[in-house]
Amino acid sequence: MAPTVEGRDATLFPEFPRGPLDTYRARASFSWKELALFTEGEDVLRFKKTIFSALEIDPLFARSPGAHLSLEKYRELNFLRCKRIFEYDFLSAGDVFESPLKVSTLIQCLGMYDWSLAAKYLLHTLIFGSVVVSAGSERHFAYIPKIFSMEIFGCFALTELSHGSNTKAIRTTAHYNPATEIRDPKTLFPMPGVMVGDIGKKLGQNGLDNGFAVFHKVRVPRQSLLNRMGDVTPEGTYVSPFKDARQRFGASLGSLSWGRVTIMGMAVTNLKLALSIAVRFSATRRQFGPTEDEEIPVLEYQTQQWRLLPYLAAAYALDHFSKSLFVDLVELQRGLAAGDRSARQAELGREIHALASAGKPLASWTAQQGIQECREACGGHGYLAVNRLGVLRDDNDPNCTYEGDNNVLLQQTSNYLLGLLACRVQDGACFRSPLKSVDFLDSYPGILDQRFEVSSVADCLDSAVALAAYKWLVCYLLRETHEKLNQEKRSGSDDFEARNNCQVFHGRPLALAFMELTVLQRFHEHVHQPCVPPSLRAVLGRLSALYALWSLNCHAALLYRGGYFSGEQAGRVLESAILTLCSQLKDDAVALVDVIAPPDFILDSPIGRADGELYKNLWGAVLQDSKVLERASWWPEFSVNKPVTGSLKSKL
Amino acid sequence: MAPTVEGRDATLFPEFPRGPLDTYRARASFSWKELALFTEGEDVLRFKKTIFSALEIDPLFARSPGAHLSLEKYRELNFLRCKRIFEYDFLSAGDVFESPLKVSTLIQCLGMYDWSLAAKYLLHTLIFGSVVVSAGSERHFAYIPKIFSMEIFGCFALTELSHGSNTKAIRTTAHYNPATEIRDPKTLFPMPGVMVGDIGKKLGQNGLDNGFAVFHKVRVPRQSLLNRMGDVTPEGTYVSPFKDARQRFGASLGSLSWGRVTIMGMAVTNLKLALSIAVRFSATRRQFGPTEDEEIPVLEYQTQQWRLLPYLAAAYALDHFSKSLFVDLVELQRGLAAGDRSARQAELGREIHALASAGKPLASWTAQQGIQECREACGGHGYLAVNRLGVLRDDNDPNCTYEGDNNVLLQQTSNYLLGLLACRVQDGACFRSPLKSVDFLDSYPGILDQRFEVSSVADCLDSAVALAAYKWLVCYLLRETHEKLNQEKRSGSDDFEARNNCQVFHGRPLALAFMELTVLQRFHEHVHQPCVPPSLRAVLGRLSALYALWSLNCHAALLYRGGYFSGEQAGRVLESAILTLCSQLKDDAVALVDVIAPPDFILDSPIGRADGELYKNLWGAVLQDSKVLERASWWPEFSVNKPVTGSLKSKL
């Protein structure tokens, strides 16, 4: 049985202040509290509340009006905040390994506050701390308490100036030689042979100090090597528990997926924040109307609905997917920790790698485009820094790049599918995977004979219609890509060239379509479970159908080209269904963002506040800057009206 | 005869330093100098060179390494720079009205340096200064010299807190009453009854100080009213040379187009800058390769070509369009100035309004998406602030919003086309317009019977193929939109509702497809003129075809749905042709950006410098920040490792 709202601690859910959003809240088809409980569960809701409340009452986390912090002050503040997070002890060292869901919730909560803080905490705890635990051995465990008190602070060095994606070609080498570390722990001056510096301002996440390190014949003690996967004996011999290099490489694939799945969660979080702002703005901003005397909320316009609501549906579907893939990854990790070397364990690793490698691009691009749409949908108000859409866009941007450029990563997924098809063609192997994401392909190529049979909009309003179309689409793209690859090879291309020439219109859309199908399949099953409270079924079904049809519509050309669609009616039905769902969801939109929006202090956007007092809040925020009504300090330059003669130096 | 490079002043074109870009420069199929001369003409090239050289040697315009300027310092600097631009006298007051092309060139050159400067200069000169001239009368002309010395500085107030797009519903009213201005010209303190303040930080263009002004019963002298279009007599009677309000509104449509056409040019300029950076980066950045020993420039990858080269083609096509529409607008303005009240003049006004209203969305969105693609295509390097892609994205962003939200503006264009169709249906009127952009519609609906007949990639490599497809597409969307509108009205919607419900999948794509066709038609004709130097024909033809097919491909679903395309071959040919053109253009890409890139000082991006010394330039830029190798000033916080106890206040 799903939990119900009655009898819950009244403090679990805020009561929103009355105001301009009341009208939409009253029109919602469901209780937002019930949906929050169904989506998050009571434990997570309480954990989030604990974190948010702690930040809100702590002066160290006070929002700085006007955001005029210098880079250096911002970084200092971020460092102090990170340290304070450890003092709050939201997570114990044990939680990191035993309650992974708590870890990802904490990261997302910190990110909703500020991604620089979340990233600093994440890199130190998970990338540095957990690698010391998982790749180190007994002699390194003494560092753990010091890491969690931030007495030792870690940094993460992966790329070289000339190497990003191609990590295998990295030129830094380590040679065995007796004895030290990078900066002196007391003075923070660099050790001999090490040059460290700051790479300067980035487009976002500037509270995080990214730097560079140059090593010139630096000696590091042998004992500093994290030696679980490979070690050097005092005599200088390399030893490893793995029999071959390929197996050792495979064993680290699991850790790659952690990063990608975490980024999916980060991207979805950004999308949720941006939508909370844009939907509340659209429900309170009025412009034009049927008569000259009456202006209507811009959310009433079909165009505005179509710009925002599909992204709202995407946020719900991708949120569910990123959480469920996280659970799968935990299962994989437990198997690894328990020494499971079964074929299923290996297959699970490959499947999760394929899903994470396309899931990260899909989530980060959807967030990138969604935030941009939110920015534009809020017009000039969205362009004011105080309303936070710019920061969200800037902070989300690296999600498209790190852990692998999105376009490059998608190849991992298309290669996975092509590999399965090759096994089927050569050995007659079945399409089967532990998480069942490829099982439908067992009916390939039979699925290719199916056709779109729906002729009315009403029949299209369930996500099952889009799922069937997606299965056909993935089979079609798989066949097309397979044939294109063979054709490239027949015409003399080597493997490197052949694969490069099969990406743009083949491997890339194949990976994306497969990913969208997987996200949809899981969300469809999730919202059609028997445990879904009856009052939530309609709205969740609509979200699922809207995300499905809106995504599918981007592939309409292929559906026609391959013959799945024929005639004008198919395309028209699809478009009408999308608009119908938008119109059905517009009265639920405010309640849907009430579920995903953090408290006002965390959301930190005057036009997105829960009271909906758009102009009052914006006006209040603008006036909070103490200098707002002052003349500029350089006003005499203007008033005296002398010619500009001084050099830049004397002016600054 | 087109001008040739021989015998030109050698100082007109720089010689690029030898370096890693040499290989691509040597492979180019044409001389970049010849293309620069053909595209810009010698006068414009010289004018640009004068401006760029002046800025480069003036210390006031020195680039500040690290970009750590405070908001206030940045604004002061921007103010001083704007003043200095007037002192340079690049443009005289007369030029503003007599040499409009010089004005737009100057704005774009200043924008390439910094959009805050360009915007400040533009708003003061063109929005304030030229309105005083064009809407004022003799009694205001004394202000002109003071405006051009910046003794009087103008501000532009259009929107209210609650009114943006819907300017007609604005609530500020002016009542006639005898007697002053907003700030005291000597002290810059606000006048009684006026509250002025700053709206705070924006996502970009922060050198520009946007503010707000509140007027509470403020008295403004009667003589301050710009009275050419309407005046108040000393007795308080309103008089106007126009007979009716509608005609007066129509007379100001021309000034609306100036803003939109100018924004097109600004967006195209941003796209050119971003591409200059990303293409040079892609030609020098190496990653992976056919063997483990050899890494190849990322520009050699088909995916990278497909990500960037269509935007490069778009930049050329949109640049030509925005210039040619500017020339049309000058013609319109001359007619207005000469008192031309002919039917042709009115029609020209409407046509330009329709083209500017869709041209601004097309150009600003293409730039927005293109800059984002460039940012991602440069990976982590693109995320470094020093490389400028972030600033370009932020500064370009308002182009999607001001002078009307893009989605809202597109309705002006679809309404124009629907209006012409209604005249044809009701009165049998011909489709004819002064600039001929709608003349092809005279063959509507006959065009709808045409089909795509091309079956080989080779036949597709000329933009004529895409033009024919676009004509069909616009006819198809026009018919669909017309029918949808009628259907909405039949089912009881009033005009307001019916139009709102016909935008998403009808009016909006209709306006965009019509606009793309118009841009393509002009570019196609431009590159096929007899005066095009023979050595430039191939590359220009490829740019035209690539932009055409790449844009068209986004509409492939409609081409199939409406029956213009049938069978799998049509879609495949389109895709292959796009990739073929990318591959044909990749060796020309560096030379193509050499034509559009400003000097290094102006471009201001280490990874985009003309010498192609990617890592050396980046390293040099990072080290220019004097603090780069220092410990953070707050290092004792870290080293002492005390718990964080002070409040935020004491830390700041």
Image: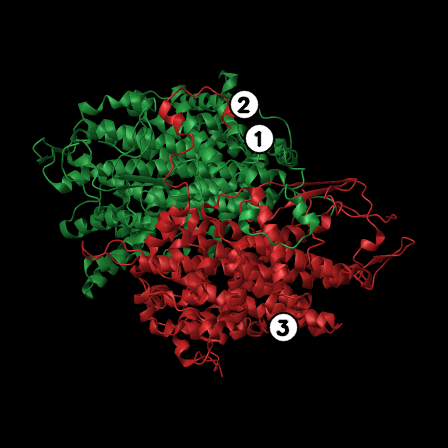
Chain colours: A green, B red
Q: Which residue is mark 2?
A: A14
Q: Which residue is mark 1?
A: A610
Please give the label number shown on residue B433.
3
Q: Mark 1 and mark 2 in contact (Cβ < 8 Å)? A: yes
For this view, does B415 lie left or right of residue B62? right
Q: Residue at x 38, y 19 (%)?
A: A89
Image coordinates of residue A499 in percent, x first then y, are 24, 56
Q: Amino acid at mark 1?
A: Ala
In-front residue for pair B526/A32: B526
In-front residue for pair A358/A220: A220
Image coordinates of residue B8 in percent, x first then y, are 46, 78
Tell me if mark 3 has few (under 14), some (14-19) or many (20+) residues whose alpha carbon lies within 10 angstroms of its own: some
Q: Amino acid at mark 3?
A: Ser
Q: Chain of mark 3?
A: B
Label 3: which secondary element = loop
The span from disc 3 to disc 2 (Cα, nearest Å) is: 60 Å
Image coordinates of residue A618 in percent, x first then y, are 62, 36
Tell me if mark 1 has few (under 14), some (14-19) or many (20+) residues whose alpha carbon lies within 10 angstroms of its own: many
The verdict on a common chain for dots 2 and 1 is yes
